[in-house]
Amino acid sequence: MNPLRRYETIMEILLAQKEVTVNELSERLDVTGKTIREDLAKLEEKGLLVRIHGGAVLAQSDQLGILSTKEPIIKHADQKSEIATIALRYIQPRDIIALDGGSTTLEIARRLENQPLTVVTNDLFIISELLHKEEIRLVVPGGYRLRNMLAGPEAVEYVSKLNIQKSFISATGVHLQHGFTIYTSDHADYKRALIRSSATVYGVADHYKFGQCALRTFASLSEVAMILTDSALPADIAKQYRDAGIQIVTQ
């Protein structure tokens, strides 16, 4: 296993468990403890984890961008509701839209009226939310289950053949230099496919994700038409992004 894939696997394990030991990683990845400690040091330098005695914990436990498989517990619910309200302004009856996996897009799904609409999603929570809205045509790509989302080459290939009008894309971090980032390539490839297949792409991100950076960049800021965020985004931060040519919508 090459180093980059080890890094991704370590982050996947941390996302699921929040804490991991060197011994556990050494056994699961079949490498020496010395190699694992070096990997953890590199990931700590990137700000993705914090080393503790005998292992590591997530550096930003409230900024995962990935829901638990057990229940959709949503942090910063008020901000996500605010973003969802903004997003609804850009959705019209009979649109073909894609809702990327995540807690903010889940909130969008919850607020969608039962109306003629096609929704593409790989998020199991969003699927469950929309199943009872019989006017909405639900399109679900194939793939394997990774926590609460479907991923893999099948999902990427399926989405690549679609004609999507509007995609709402989530991210773990939004950064001026590094763009939209996430922890693992499994989701990055799917997000890239959504972007390529969409006429218009909207980024959706809570204000606390601005300036944050995860392991994988899946899109530059210029690849989205605008970023929808909540009104708590500091004015000076919003100005930095607007000065860089990025449209920020907060209300």
Image: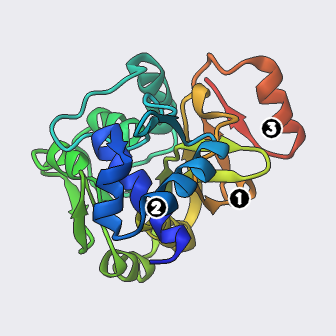
Closer mark to the observer between disc 3 and disc 2? 2
Whether the residues at callouts 3 and 1 have beta carbons within 8 Å, the answer is no
Task: Tell me: residue 56, above or below residue 32.
Answer: above
In what quadrant of the picture does the N terminus appear?
A: bottom left
Q: Name the image quarter holding residue 149.
A: bottom left
The residue identified by callout 1 is 220
Residue 241 is labelled as 3
Query: Badge 3, how many Cα within 10 Å: few under 14, some, many 20+?
Result: some
Q: Position of residue 50 (x, y in %)?
A: 52, 35
SS class, disc 3? helix
Q: Viewed as shown, does residue 246 lie left or right of 140?
A: right
Query: Badge 2, how many Cα within 10 Å: few under 14, some, many 20+?
Result: some
Q: Name the image quarter holding residue 249.
A: top right
SS class, disc 2? helix
In what quadrant of the picture does the C terminus appear?
A: top right
Q: Is residue 231 visible?
A: yes
Q: Nearer the viewer, residue 36 or 182?
A: 36
